[in-house]
Amino acid sequence: MIILRCFGAENYYLERVIFPFEILNFSAPEEAEVEIWSHEFGGAELVESFKVAELHT
C-alpha cells in the first residue's frame, strides 16, 4: 500500500491510498507536485517527489 499526495496552485489537493496492482488516473495542474509515501512499521516515509509536468513525457 502506498499513499499518493498531489498538491498545487488554487488549493488543488489530492490524496489517495493505492493498493498493489491498482492503477490511479488523475488530472492535475502542470505546476503541481506529487509525493509518494509508503507506510512502514515506524510510520509514513516519503519515497519519491516530483512535478506533474515530469509525467507528461
Image (spheres, grey):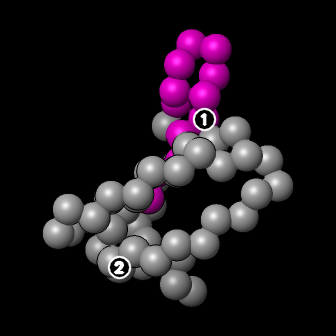
Tag shown at residue 30: 2
Local crowd at mark 1 within 10 Å, few (<14), some, or many (≥20)? Answer: some
Marks 2 and 1 sit apart, C-alpha to C-alpha, by 24 Å
Which quadrant is the C terminus positioned in?
bottom right
Residue shown at 76%/57% (left/top)? 22
In what element is the residue under mark 1? strand
Q: Where does residue 27 sit, x and y in percent of width and height?
A: 46, 77
Quick check: 29 above or below 47? below
- Name the image quarter holding residue 40: top right
- Hey, what amino acid is under mark 2? Glu
Q: Is residue 46 magenta?
A: no
What secondary structure is found at the residue carrying circle 2? loop
Q: Is residue 29 above or below residue 10?
A: below
Q: Residue at x 33, y 77 (%)?
A: 29
Query: Which residue is the site of mark 1?
Result: 38
The residue that appears at 20% across and 62% down in the rendered structure is: 11
In the picture, which quadrant includes the N terminus? top right
The residue type indicated by label 1 comes to Ser
Front residue of 53 and 18: 18
The one of 6 and 17 positioned closer to us in this rendering: 17
Which percent across, then down, holds residue 12? 28, 64
Is 35 situated above or below 2? Answer: below
Q: Looking at the image, is mark 2 or mark 1 earlier in the sequence?
A: 2
Binning the other alpha carbons within 10 Å of mark 2 as few (below 14), some (14 to 19) or many (20 upward) gives: some
Asked if residue 40 is positioned above or below residue 12 in the image, the reply reads above
Q: Main secondary structure of the magenta part?
A: strand
Magenta span of residues: 34-45
Q: x%, y% of residue 50?
A: 44, 61
